Image (cartoon, rainbow, N blue to C red):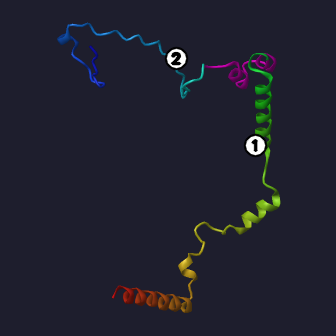
Amino acid sequence: MMLDDAGFERNDKITGREPAQRKDKPAEQMYDREVPINGVSGHTLLHDWLDGEVDVMRASEVEGKSKVELWTRINAESEMLRRRVTPVGVQQRIMASLPDTPGTANSWWKQITPVSAIAITVALLAVGALIIQALR
């Protein structure tokens, strides 16, 4: 006989059976802010080398020379990018283009002249008249 409980708990006292004991594996100790990655066997020697806990020779013997070389290049490039600065001329042009005091930039509606305001109003009235004619 096959029972499908659809995920609901059954009352095993009614059927006279003992409930099956779950055999969960013991949970590994989780460290602060550590996120488990499913499918990965766990902490490797490469991680220890990247953290500075193992020397490069041991890491390359166990994990493979290509992985160690890849991460060595990544570390070197990221260190180069950390030291990169904006050239002085570019920085001076950026600073010169900023307003002297914050919040003094002109708003777009303050730049509209009376002539352009009249032209915009006439255009909107013409579009409104066309829409009214189309709806009739």
x 52%, y 21%: residue? 30
Q: Residue furthest front?
A: 1
Which range of residues does the magenta coloring cover?
Answer: 42-60
Where residue 102 appears, x then y in whole percent? 60, 66
| 55 in magenta | yes
Q: Mark 1 is on which residue type? A: Arg
x 26%, y 13%: residue? 1
Between circles 2 and 1, the one closer to the viewer is 2
5 relative to 25 in the view: left or right: left
| 62 in magenta | no
Q: Nearer the viewer, residue 65 or 77?
A: 65
Q: Which residue is mark 2?
A: 29
Picture quadrant of residue 39:
top right
Q: Are marks 2 and 1 in contact (CB under 8 Å)?
A: no
Which is more N-terminal, label 1 or label 2? 2
Q: Which residue is mark 1?
A: 82
85 relative to 48 in the view: left or right: right
Examine the rendered structure and indicate whether residue 40 appears above or below residue 94: above
Density class for disc 1 (Cα within 10 Å; few <14, some 14-19, many ≥20) is few
